[in-house]
Amino acid sequence: MWPSAEKIYTLRISLNIMRSIFQPFILLSLILSAGSAAASDYSASLHADDPFEGNWTELCGPSSTMIPAIILTRSDVSWTYPHELHPIYTPDQNITGTFFGSSGLANLTVHITVADLNISNFLRAMNMVAGPVRINPDGESFDLNSLGDVSFSIPGTSPGIRALYVVDNNSSTVLSAVPVLIAEREIMVEAPPVVGPGDLLFVKISVPNDSTNGSINESDDVHFHYGAILIALEDYRKINLTMTGNGTLEDASFFLSKGENSVEIPSDFKLSSDMLMDFVMMLPPESAVAFQMDLYEQESELCMITEPGWAQGTYILTCAVVSDSGIIGLKQMEIEMI
Amino acid sequence: MMMKILASLAILALITVGFALDASPMNPDPGEKVMITGFAKPGEAVRLSSSFDLDLPVVAGRYEYVANGVEIPQKPNRFSVTARNIEDLNVGIKMGIWLNMPIKASGGTASVSRADVPPGRYTLKMFGNAKEGASDVSVSVSAETTVYADSDGSYKLAIDTTGIPEGDYRVRGAGDLIVLGIGADHGVASLPSSSEVRVEDRAVSTASPMSTEAEKSPDEAKPDQVIEEVAEIEPEESVYSAAATDEAAGEVVEEVAEPVEKERIDQDQASLNITENATWPIEDTVEEKGIFGKILDRIFGILELVAT
């Protein structure tokens, strides 16, 4: 189906602890893809920084995580992803959001479709890579209002990483694309909302049985891996994922940066231990990571170590649970350091 | 009587020649550097480990120990902690940021062993819940590295004892074990009975120099607690028999010849390694990946990145 010269890396539906707790990797993993079904070629509309006129889709849901800034810099295209929060859905939840199209799209009928996320298609739809976006034109139709916007709600899907596309079938144009993360369950995180510098922050993460997915029995032989990261909100906001290139996947560069420090993510998306280690070393010292792997128990108590010198203020605690089959859940909460 | 003395001296002399490991000074002051020296085959790699024990007081059911400035040498290396009389163990390492991992105890004991820790100077923190009713928790800490013998077959290793608690400080290598007495009141330095030498100590591998530095936490062992342990040390005259020493030395090369090559091949790939609930000494895990490698392998396994 695909040109042999074109390298496409697929990603089976799943996330992982480190990607989950290191939010920048989520976006990276969202860019990775699984193959898509037979489809038609679409062109991609250009995005702009303006969140209301830039052809962006803002998803919303009951549980959201903060993501780092995502910046695209090409000679002919540049934008900064305008949304800071990104929802995490579970299969039983509808995918809801609003497409903010340019006013020139007023009263247009669009189709909104959710597909497995494919790297080439997604990067093309996001203007990172030039070329046609091949997607299945199926989807629910919605009428844009006089501002070129529309709010939507479409049924959820099975756990994994998906992409939501807003397409104009008349002009064969993908107007917008956004990754969608669907976790298996909604995990529970218990942590004190307030801690002092130097305190141990105990974080209890549990995987509840739910009506949709049922109970997890020991006979299921499911190993859970728990992870959590604590990072100051101020530092978190300084992390960004910058994408540069000349429009080809081969020449695309991805940098995870904080201040003057950056870690390059290879364009073939083959992540390495060294790269992650570099990223960990890039994090500010006022950060903490805790993890526990290979547990049968649906609960883990992690302990984040803080130090007396840590600055007061808001910290972001991101917790994730994964199993060998994929992401179980991801949750974020704010902790006040006083 | 004179004959007995001469015979004893002769035996001691023979034993001394037979040892592949020596230390100076044997009774260092806290913070003083100890030079470990020995002989092996030219170019041979000798694994050396050092260890000490602590009895940590239990306060409100919890225990804690902090070691500042622990210097980890270049790979391959290994750092191990075993805690007894506990419900759980948390081992945190500050590598720029704090990384912490809880370990469940089994039968009141929990161990963690990290191999090929990225070189650097770290702060370590061990803490958790003690067993119900326990008044103290016993913690063993060991660091391991290897050195190469030069063309003359001699090797040496400088160990910085800064911050290492006063008391017994054991150095093992090439089949020998030396017990240093750190601090003025712990002047008993000895070689142990043969039963105290573990087979793993005779292993030979690749490596680099090591220096370990730690600072006592406010909670760590008090001198009187350490003194109790000195009593367990064999007196000086209770050294190896020459036969036992030779036997141990002889096994060194045979046992480790192949692992040495394997470690040389794998050392660049390894980073940091965790073995939960292991008992000391840890089995050779040169082929295991480091903690991040292990985690990432797992993660990437989950992700199953596939080129299509």
Image: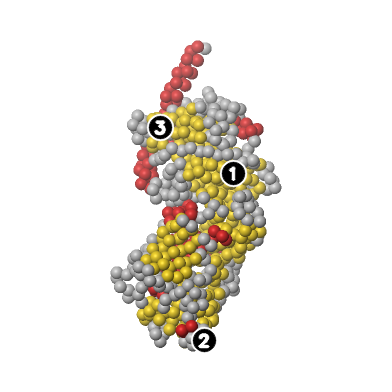
SS at mark 1? strand
Which amino acid, by three-letter code, is at mark 3? Answer: Tyr
Which amino acid, by three-letter code, is at mark 2? Answer: Ser
Q: Quadrant of residue A230?
A: bottom right
Which amino acid, by three-letter code, is at mark 1? Answer: Val
Please tell me whether residue B244 is drawn above or below residue A247 in the rendered image.
above
Q: Earlier in the sequence, mark 3 or mark 1?
A: 1
Which residue appears at 45% of the width and 51% of the height? B290
Q: Is residue B212 left or right of residue A244?
A: right
Residue at which label 3 appears: B155
- Confirm whether residue A4 shows in the render: yes
Q: CA distance from mark 3 to mark 1?
A: 32 Å
Q: Are marks 1 and 2 in contact (CB under 8 Å)?
A: no
Residue B194 spot, x, y in % from top left = 49, 31
Q: Nearer the viewer, residue A27 or B252?
A: A27
Establish whether labels 1 and 2 are both on one chain: no
Q: Quadrant of residue A78?
A: bottom left
Which chain's residue wears label 2?
A
Mark 3 or 1: in front is: 1
Q: Residues within 10 Å of mark 3 (few under 14, many from 20)?
A: many
Mark 1 or 2: in front is: 2
Which residue appears at 62% of the width and 31% of the height? B227
SS at mark 3? strand
Residue at which label 1 appears: B66
Q: Is residue B145 left or right of residue B102?
A: left
Residue at which label 2 appears: A146
